[in-house]
Image: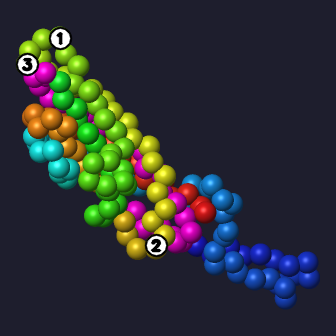
Amino acid sequence: MPISTIGQNGLAQSRILTTVQQPAGAVLQVVNGTSITATNTSSTSFVSTSLFATITPTSSANNVLILCSYAAFGLYNGGDYCIGTIFRNLTNLGGGTYSALSSTGSYAWGLNQGYDVYTNIMHLDAPSTTSAQTYRLYIKSYAGQSIYANDSAWRSSITLLEIAG
């Protein structure tokens, strides 16, 4: 919505501001996504999960702060890790095929005991565009054992904040 200003000499000097400049660091918009749909895998390559959110930055100079909390679960068979990362569209923000943004160990008290832990990812991204960007949680198993993220007992969420550049 445009903002009107009235000058010192009344309406003769008035003008309409169509955009308002926000200071660097200001939060411009917030988008949230949630999931209770489990993604199960024993793959040692990243697989897509049902947890995502899409944001359209208002300026290519702005950043996107990603806050992600998800439940990770698996069976302990000598130790494994649920490795999670965030992809922006098809780009792994963790840095590549073997890099990630989080890792959750499978700590349990005996053979085939389950573990279920909440893991958080925080990452500041610079997409450098005003096109819609989808941020999605991907997971993989470190040692090839069965793991999953999200489930009906734990609500996982991803929140995207556009930050003025």
Q: For the C terminus, give its image quadrant.
A: bottom right
- The answer to whether 44 is drawn above or below residue 92 in the figure is above
How far apart, in angstroms, are the residues tagged by discs 1 and 3?
9 Å
**Disc count in the image?**
3
What amino acid type should be assigned to the residue bearing mark 2? Thr
Q: Say if residue 86 shows up in the picture.
A: yes
Dot 1 crowding, Cα within 10 Å, few <14, some 14–19, many 20+: few
* Badge 1 vs badge 3, beta-carbon distance below 8 Å: no
* Badge 3 vs badge 2, beta-carbon distance below 8 Å: no
Query: Quadrant location of residue 25?
Result: bottom right
- According to the picture, the residue beneath numbered tag 2 turns out to be 129
Q: Say if residue 33 shows up in the picture.
A: no
How far apart, in angstroms, are the residues tagged by discs 1 and 2?
48 Å
- According to the picture, the residue beneath numbered tag 1 turns out to be 109
In front: label 1 or label 2: 1
In magenta, the rendered stretch is 50-78
Query: SS of the residue at dot 3?
Result: loop
- According to the picture, the residue beneath numbered tag 3 turns out to be 112
What amino acid type should be assigned to the residue bearing mark 1? Trp
Query: Quadrant location of residue 74?
Result: top left
Spot the residue most to the bottom.
Answer: 12
What amino acid type should be assigned to the residue bearing mark 3? Asn
Residue drawn 62% across the image and 55% down it: 26
